[in-house]
Amino acid sequence: MWESWGSNMVVKVKWFYHPEETKLGKRQSDGKNALYQSCHEDENDVQTISHKCQVVGREHYEQMTRSKKYQDRQDLYYLAGTYDPTTG
């Protein structure tokens, strides 16, 4: 995060995609909170950030969701794989 020349706060982000947003769409193996990491990066105004989330490996996700502490979290996702938006 940094301040731009115009005094706006800017953040560099790496994009993740929900299975439904990929060219293949949601597959049977994709669970409820699957995300695909991409190499796509952008610089955006910090005001475009809607919320924070946590992305962990699938094994760690399954361990966490067995715990009552994490069962109802809407901001917990697991990494299902990678996705290249230019080639699909």
Image (cartoon, rainbow, N blue to C red):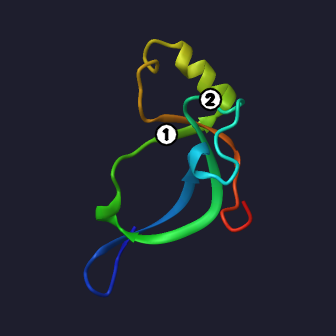
Q: Which residue is mark 1?
A: 54
What amino acid is found at the position of numbered circle 2 in the picture? Gly
**Whole-number angstrom distance, CA of label 2 to CA of label 1:** 16 Å
Residue 83 in the image, given as x and y percentages of width and height: 69, 55
Q: Residue at x 62, y 29 (%)?
A: 31
Q: Quadrant of the N terminus?
A: bottom left
Residue in front for this viewpoint, 8 or 35? 35
Displayed quadrant of residue 66: top right
- Secondary structure at numbered mark 1: strand
Residue in front for this viewpoint, 44 or 30? 30
Displayed quadrant of residue 86: bottom right
Q: Residue at x 61, y 44 (%)?
A: 19
Q: Residue at x 56, y 68 (%)?
A: 41
Q: Residue at x 45, y 72 (%)?
A: 43
Residue 38 in the image, given as x and y percentages of width and height: 64, 58
What amino acid is found at the position of numbered circle 1 in the picture? Gln
Residue, far left: 7
Above or below: residue 57 compared with residue 61: below
Residue 88 in the image, given as x and y percentages of width and height: 72, 59
Q: From the image, state whether disc 2 or disc 1 is nearer to you.
A: 2
Q: Estimate how packed mark 2 is, as few (under 14), some (14 to 19) or many (20 or more) residues with alpha carbons within 10 Å.
A: some
Q: Which tag, 2 or 1, sits closer to the chain's start?
A: 2
